[in-house]
Image (spheres, coloured by chain):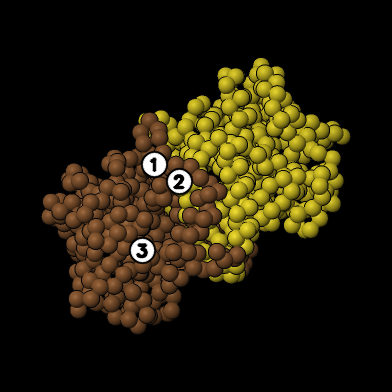
Chain colours: A yellow, B brown
Amino acid sequence: MDEIITLDYGSGGKKTSRLIERTILPALDNPALRELSDGAIVPGGEQLVFSTDSFVVSPLFFPGGDIGKLSVCGTVNDIAVCGAKPLYLSCALILEEGFPLSDLERILASMRDAAAAAGVQVVTGDTKVVERGRGDGVYINTAGIGVLRWSGLSPRAMRGGDAVIVSGAVGDHGTAVMLSRSGMAQGDIRSDCAALNGLTEAILRLDAGVRVLRDPTRGGVATTLNEFVEGGPLGIELDAGAIPVHGAVRSACELLGLDPLYCANEGKLLAVEPEESVQPVLDAMHARPEGAEAAVIGRVTDRYPGKVVAQTALGGKRILQKLTGAQLPRIC
Amino acid sequence: MDEIITLDYGSGGKKTSRLIERTILPALDNPALRELSDGAIVPGGEQLVFSTDSFVVSPLFFPGGDIGKLSVCGTVNDIAVCGAKPLYLSCALILEEGFPLSDLERILASMRDAAAAAGVQVVTGDTKVVERGRGDGVYINTAGIGVLRWSGLSPRAMRGGDAVIVSGAVGDHGTAVMLSRSGMAQGDIRSDCAALNGLTEAILRLDAGVRVLRDPTRGGVATTLNEFVEGGPLGIELDAGAIPVHGAVRSACELLGLDPLYCANEGKLLAVEPEESVQPVLDAMHARPEGAEAAVIGRVTDRYPGKVVAQTALGGKRILQKLTGAQLPRIC
């Protein structure tokens, strides 16, 4: 392992996993943390889900959202995919000296709107200021609490033959931010940044035996699906042609040398379902705007244990590994 | 109000208050946030206390502690002073590219030890990396959840004649960090960084009618006492000579041009109590190492509504305002 932190350690891919597994978990070990889900389920009168994310996205404002909206939706989504109803958020700001107050106001207004849309309240917070050149405008941490409504969601619940569904087109957020960062922002590529708790609740209410839900953020769909299967007896076979990708995103990815399957999403859901639930779940997704483009994109299989394999249009197969390196630093 | 963020906005004093009141609260308004306590009490099966702090202390390591220990104790204390038993923490790291992994390991070990000492578990986390020059080694956010055990603690519960108690000598943390930053660290001045939940529980178990508890961190004792009385009908009269300050800290403060009453503490408790509870509360404090130097330092009075007034050894009086300006930037 390297002796200093490099940007790859923040990629959400292999190096991030290694840092967490070799350095962070051994230091802070306990059963709830070991679960390595997006949130921790902690005992209480009711079972609670507790999650946190720091947001360091650059630029702060991008088509389809900003760091404020992202910081609310990101934590809401981490709680929602655990099967919980998100209720309360914290908001901790690390401001850089010289940051325009008008930008802060705009960001806070986005947080307010996003919290209202998701039905959560920001109930506590903190504000720190660092000197010029020790930050980058503003970094936002949100932590959140939700009440567990549907327990047992886990990659370990997956079975061979299960369907893998994505709630819409992939790669919008990562591409929008990268284009925006390079000054090439174009109107038809917008971040998908959105709260998913309405969608997860609509699906889970069906009692359709959902195995696992996850929002494929840093590292994209390919990395999240790898997390589902790594070290286990099952694999996932993707039908590359079935994965929805907006045309403009596909073109931009070609231009930027990115793969949409590794681009961050901030308003998409991956759901693994038993075959018999596919239609009701797809119907529930299609009934909502954020799920209008939902599609079955693959199957769980015992043929490729621990691997995610994509079947290409030409009939070939390629193994999709976890993201390596820092393809998209500071994407969220 | 200024149009850009200056370091004062992170001081924990007047400018921080103004930023919170004029910019942050109006944007994110709700009743729990309005309480402006160190944590939010949120409804649930049991009542929960939820709190967050980001830590940006510089240097990362200082006599008596480091950013890891601080990040655990700080959030534990914010929850404890609300009358709750802290249970779970999150840990979100913003690492700067190039940060030595060995330093991270040392910091995480401190977090582990501090969490064990306080009886809390770190159950969820996040890791981001920013480019060189966009951070300062590591910033840590912790959020925490506790179960409310003693409700009703509030500055609004104070009555004229109540005693103001501090659990020990003031100014250790701020002075230790400032000396360490300026390369003048000396062995006899150490941060008081410690978890206070054992102490708060020992006091609250007495059922002694405690009015309010608070840990005087950024802005020091003077700023926290101002927060107790501002805008209300009561004031606080301090006996300046009764406030415990270690000799070395007093000398260092003179050297650095600091006032110990405005220096951050990270392991001290302010308690306001009815007169008849003073002795049992002092006894409970003195029975524990972290409360061994506890002393009554003043009284609540209706003579100076909204003000904190210090009676000096020479019989004079001075009004102690909230901290203005950034006396001690990045102290926690």
- Residue beneath label 3, please? B223
- Compared with A206, B253 (above or below) is below
Please give the label number shown on residue A226: none
- Compared with A165, B92 (above or below) is below
Q: Amino acid at mark 2?
A: Leu
Q: CA distance from mark 1 to mark 3?
A: 23 Å
- Residue beneath label 2, please? B33
Query: Relative to A276, is B220 on the left or the right?
Result: left
Q: Secondary structure at mark 1?
A: strand
Residues tagged 1 and 3 counted as in contact (Cβ below 8 A)? no
**Comes first in the chain, label 2 or label 1:** 2
Residue found at the very far right of the displayed protein: A314
Q: Amino acid at mark 1?
A: Ile
Which chain does the numbered disc 3 sit on? B
Q: Position of residue A315 (x, y in %)?
A: 84, 32
Discs 2 and 1 share one subunit: yes
Residues tagged 2 and 1 counted as in contact (Cβ below 8 A)? no
- Residue beneath label 1, please? B41
Discs 1 and 3 share one subunit: yes
